[in-house]
């Protein structure tokens, strides 16, 4: 399901930008800030719109999947709930090997209280110094483990990795099969040339059966960035309890004083809400339903923009139905853009998916209220996905599209633009071609070629172009 949403999102992103991209024409010049009405500005702004649309749908997919896949909610320092057993295994490996070889636990015949089981130090072949100390309380059957790894010059940038774990050993110190981790804390300190100063995280786990994965708890984390970075701090909090649902929060503080805030709440049956506030004043809010019992998943989202922006708001909704017998799917996406002058632009897309030889094939047919629209086909393969299709833009020009969507969320597109569908059918030459590369963050570069003359431009993730 997650891969399906990713592919759908990228197709919607591409379809939403074709009209703007095909407005490119020849206007060669030296690199400079593009005028607002220049082809480069139109192309780059449309490119940003496309990539934003892809990420929006990808985020919806992640939110929908998130109620069933806690791996999507990662916290600094300790990772995610679904991977907690892997994190804990690495920190407890030496402890388990050590106590399992003990034939006598020192000090347990004394009065009840804390006993140091062992305090060990060693240096491994990589030059990493390890220090591990274990304190056991024979009155409670619980232990505290301190694990520290340090390197004088920073191993992969980390100078010091410190972890504290609270365990319930159930009074069986040498038998680790019934151990339960109740909570953990980790902090990593980085060397001066690293982009992070430090990161820390904690997890407080709900009771779980030994030798199984934890299913609930609270995870918090924080990253503090070194000077000179765009971000100054990121903090997260994830809480989930089996059968009860949970919540996710992420807060980003930027060096320029701006913020990004994200909150997601979800129930045990797969429904939930989300709110996101962006540094530019944009706000997204919506709902999702990924129950799965009826093989359907859906979401709604409303985006509002700060004063002076155009469009003023965007409403989106989508519903997908999966056939579990062959993994095929059908879906409908609806979008409504409201502009400052009162105009409303509506979009509707029909999406189908088939699977052959383990690879997805998605076909999207989109119609827009302004007369634009077309069909796109995305074929997944071993090394990526290829995109082909055709489009009618606002000027009623006919656009042929082919490109590649890469696993890292970058993309390469080639557009061949004809004066009209009739001109294409009659064999007329293209009026111009455009080649565009999108980086994973939505920025990129493009070249427009017409009558043998090329114009190059670059664009940022916000759509600002330089020619």
Image (cartoon, rainbow, N blue to C red):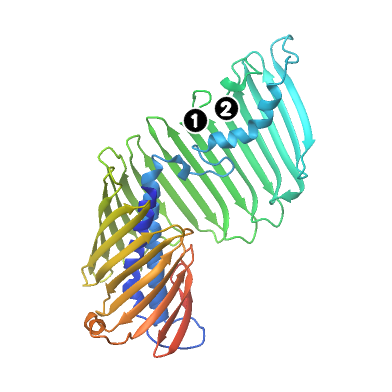
**Taking 182 as reference, is 348 above or below it?**
below
Q: Is residue 71 visible?
A: yes
**Taking 345 as reference, is 146 above or below it?**
above
Tell me the distance, in whole angstroms, between the alpha carbons under discs 1 and 2.
9 Å
Percent x, y of residue 123: 79, 39
Mark 1 or 2, nearer chain start:
2
Q: Nearer the viewer, residue 344 or 94?
A: 94
119 left or right, relative to 255: right
Secondary structure type for disc 1: loop
- Sort mark 2 into few (<14), some (14-19) or many (20+) by Cα contacts within 10 Å: many
| Residue 128 image-quadrant placement | top right
| Residue 390 image-quadrant placement | bottom left
The residue located at (65%, 58%) in the rendering is: 227
Q: Nearer the viewer, residue 225 or 173?
A: 173
- Contact, CB < 8 Å: mark 1 with mark 2? yes
Percent x, y of residue 241: 43, 31
Q: What numbered label is drawn on residue 236?
A: none
Secondary structure type for disc 2: strand
Q: Is residue 36 visible?
A: no
Q: Nearer the viewer, residue 150 or 113?
A: 150
424 left or right, relative to 198: left
409 left or right, relative to 198: left
The residue located at (64%, 13%) in the rendering is: 139
The residue located at (31%, 74%) in the rendering is: 19
The residue located at (72%, 12%) in the rendering is: 108
Percent x, y of residue 263: 42, 46
Residue on which the image places disc 1: 214
172 left or right, relative to 270: right
**Taking 77 as reference, is 229 above or below it?**
below
Residue on which the image places disc 2: 181
């Amino acid at each position: 399901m997650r891969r399906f949403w990713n592919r759908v999102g990228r197709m919607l992103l591409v379809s939403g930008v074709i009209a703007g991209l095909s407005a490119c024409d020849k206007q060669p010049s030296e690199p400079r800030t593009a005028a607002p009405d220049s082809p480069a500005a139109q192309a780059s702004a449309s490119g940003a719109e496309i990539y934003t649309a892809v990420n929006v749908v990808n985020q919806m997919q992640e939110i929908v999947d998130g109620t069933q896949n806690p791996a999507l909610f990662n916290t600094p320092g300790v990772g995610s709930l679904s991977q907690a057993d892997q994190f804990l295994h690495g920190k407890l490996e030496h402890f388990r090997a050590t106590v399992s070889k003990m034939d006598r636990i020192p000090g347990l015949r004394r009065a009840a209280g804390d006993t140091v089981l062992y305090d060990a130090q060693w240096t491994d072949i990589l030059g990493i110094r390890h220090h591990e100390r274990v304190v056991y309380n024979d009155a409670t059957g619980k232990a505290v483990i301190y694990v520290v790894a340090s390197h004088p010059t920073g191993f992969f940038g980390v100078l010091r990795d410190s972890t504290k774990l609270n365990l319930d050993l159930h009074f069986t110190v040498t038998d680790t099969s019934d151990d339960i981790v109740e909570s953990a804390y980790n902090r990593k300190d980085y060397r001066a040339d690293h982009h992070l100063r430090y990161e820390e995280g904690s997890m407080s786990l709900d009771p779980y059966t030994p030798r199984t994965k934890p299913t609930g708890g609270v995870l918090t984390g924080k990253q503090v960035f070194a000077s000179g970075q765009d971000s100054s701090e990121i903090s997260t909090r994830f809480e989930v309890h089996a059968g009860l649902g949970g919540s996710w929060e992420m807060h980003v503080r930027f060096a320029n004083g701006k913020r990004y805030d994200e909150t997601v709440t979800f129930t045990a049956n797969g429904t939930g809400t989300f709110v996101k506030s962006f540094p530019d004043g944009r706000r997204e809010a919506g709902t999702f339903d990924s129950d799965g019992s009826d093989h359907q998943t859906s979401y709604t989202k409303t985006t509002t923009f700060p004063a002076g922006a155009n469009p003023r708001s965007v409403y989106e909704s989508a519903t997908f139905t999966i056939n579990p017998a062959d993994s095929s799917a059908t879906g409908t996406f609806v979008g409504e853009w409201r502009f400052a002058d009162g105009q409303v632009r509506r979009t509707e897309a029909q999406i189908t998916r088939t699977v052959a030889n383990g690879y997805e094939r998605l076909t999207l047919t989109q119609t827009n209220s302004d007369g634009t629209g077309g069909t796109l086909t995305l074929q997944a393969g071993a090394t990526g996905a290829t995109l082909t299709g055709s489009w009618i833009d606002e000027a009623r020009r006919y656009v042929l599209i082919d490109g590649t969507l890469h696993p890292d969320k970058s993309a390469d597109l080639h557009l061949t633009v004809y004066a009209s569908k009739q001109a294409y059918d009659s064999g007329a030459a293209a009026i111009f071609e455009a080649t565009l590369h999108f980086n994973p963050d939505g920025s990129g570069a493009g070249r427009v070629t017409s009558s043998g003359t090329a114009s190059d431009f670059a664009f940022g993730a916000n759509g600002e172009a330089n020619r």
